[in-house]
Amino acid sequence: MEFAKIGSLQMTLLVLLTVLSFAVPLVVAIIWTVRKKEHFTTVLVGAATFFLFAVILEKPIQNVLVVPTQMGLPEHAAAAWIGARPFLMALILALFHGVFEETGRLIAFKTVLKNRKNRETSISHGIGHGGFEVMFLIGVSYLGYLSYAFMINSGTFGMVVEQVKALAPDQADQLILLARQMAELTAPSILLVMAERTFAVLFHIGASILVFYACRDRERFWLYPVAILLHTALDFVSALMYVDLIRIPVWLMEGVIVVFGIGTFCAAYLLLYRKDKPQSEAASAV
């Protein structure tokens, strides 16, 4: 099986996006913590929150309960019942993201960050959570794509696809599609990925602000379920696409992320963060 060679432009774009996916979140975190004299460990806690609750806990549980076949497990009665109802399946998949990630923030602020009451803690955690998501979902993925690109250009990718096809035909089809997409990679498509992740990070920062104030003030605990609902609504659109209930252009899906990212961040920043006096100002006012 032969594949179109990955051109020098496409290879450069793959390398660029991979490097930026790791470098930009790290640089933003360093600049923020230095300028605000924040603990870098708060950023690390945000990163750990995503990894523990979204990767270690959420994904396996979601797969076992909703899509066990993705883990090579036989489909059980509950999964079959949910699978026969695509709308419900999309809602459950989106709800998993909302509940696990926002509960992760809640537990982080209630435990390891419970003594960090300054408002900057909320943004530091959000930068860590959203930044690590970029590294994990984009950076790690594109590292894999780079290895595939080198195999395509060396002529060994076809053998890999044949081996995968013998074990999992669906995954082999995905590899073939990926090879075509890499050969057609353009600068605008890279910019689209970068823009999408930027607004996704804004959403995570906004959600972290919401949950931070939910933990700091009992009367505002309602902000925690609001964060879950917003997160669920954001992922519900992509979940509907996943179960083939809707098909919308890529730009429209990106528009949804832009609206949720800007809306959640601006609302949380203007209504909560900005109205909260920094500790230095509060102390001088006493």
Image (spheres, rainbow, N blue to C red):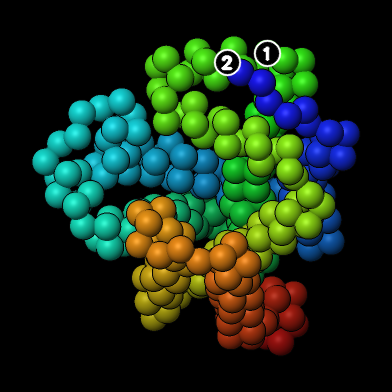
Q: Choose top left, top right, bottom left or bottom right for residue 265.
A: bottom right
Outermost residue toward the left? Answer: 77
Callout 2, which amino acid?
A: Val
Taking 286 as reference, is 280 above or below it? above
Task: Determine whether label 2 and label 1 are within 8 Å by CB.
Answer: yes
In the image, what residue type sits under mark 1?
Thr
Which quadrant would the N terminus be assigned to in this image?
top right
Residue designated by label 1: 156
Disc 1 packing (10 Å; few <14; some 14–19; many ≥20): some
Measured as percent of width and height from the top left, residue 273 is found at 63, 77
Q: Which residue is mark 2?
A: 160
Residue drawn at 75 percent across, 45 percent down: 185
Q: Is residue 227 left or right of residue 154?
A: left
Instruction: Point out the image quarter for the C terminus.
Output: bottom right
Residue 64 found in image quarter: top left
Q: Is residue 2 above or below residue 192?
A: above
24 or 41, which lies in front?
24
Looking at the rendered structure, the secondary structure element under dot 1 is loop
Rounded to the nearest whole Å, what is the CA distance between mark 2 and mark 1? Answer: 7 Å
Question: How far across and down, in percent of the image, does residue 39 sit?
Answer: 71, 51
Disc 2 is placed on an element classified as helix
Which of the pair 247/147 is nearer the observer? 247
> Relative to residue 215, is residue 275 depicted above or below?
below
